[in-house]
Amino acid sequence: MSEFVFREIDPRNDEDMRKYFVLAEKLSKFLKNGASFDENQMRWARIRMGAIEYVDLSDWINRQLQPIEENAHEFVFVCQCDNKFVGYINFCDYHMVKSGKIIEDDTGAIHEIFVHQDYRKNHTIASNLLMLAVNKLLSKGKTKAVCSVQDDNPNKFLHFVIADGNIIDKEECTREDGSKTVDNTLLIDLINLQKMSGMEIAKKAAKLKRKQINQNKDNLII
């Protein structure tokens, strides 16, 4: 039987970064957001994750490398199975406002959580990744986190549950293919979320999904 291993990726490990970007690109195509995944994007991802020597590659080989943890502000945990990354969560210990200003207070941000479609029936992958992020953010002194989810995302119910329905902003956004949807910004209470089990989150998400399906049926009848 294949074993699932959960761990934080090493931004100095080329194989880790390559596998992570392969999954991130799959999520981008699913969301149709037109994100870039070239070598320059990977370099800046490494820097945000604490490998600051990638700011200047001209002589970093000759310099003593600084500890990752001292310089990391963005983090990625993955689920690995048979030497393949099958899921990941990307988050950081700060958040940004609409103007692009970085805010460093008690609020972090969960940017992406993704599980490969072949493994989505195993609901523990997403919940384990989520709790790794929650615990890491709490260890960094963060008690809240923002995240966003679009109305046309079939997995949006999970996001609404972990934020306890706390929507702090809505705005229309346009996909790469020209289609439009609504982007919801949610605020998560990390302390409350830490107390919830993965099973509890999954059950509440399923209940919320059934409720919306029934509402849609009622609207069609009307």
Image (spheres, rainbow, N blue to C red):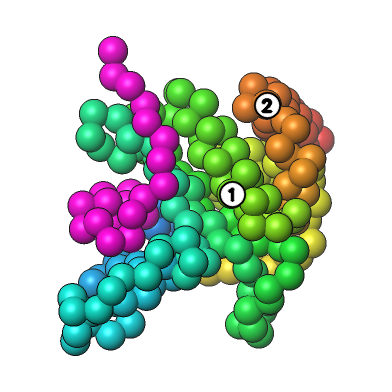
Q: Could you say where residue 220 lies in the image, as x and y percent from the top left?
A: 73, 35
* The C terminus sits in image quarter: top right
Going 75% across and 32% down the picture, which residue do you hit? 195
Q: Could you say where residue 69 lies in the image, as x and y percent from the top left?
A: 47, 61
User: Which amino acid type is shown beneath numbered disc 2?
Assistant: Ser
Relative to residue 183, is residue 193 depicted above or below? above
Residue 12 belongs to the span the image colors magenta: yes
Q: Quadrant of residue 170?
A: bottom right
Task: Give the left or right position of residue 187, taking residue 78 as reference.
Answer: right
Mark 1 nearby-residue class (10 Å; few <14, some 14–19, many ≥20): some
Task: Identify the magenta region.
Answer: 1-26
User: Which amino acid type is shown beneath numbered disc 1?
Assistant: Lys
Q: Could you say where residue 66 lies in the image, as x and y percent from the top left?
A: 37, 70
Residue closest to the eye, 116 or 56: 56
Residue picked out by circle 1 = 136
Relative to residue 175, is residue 125 depicted above or below? above
Residue picked out by circle 2 = 197
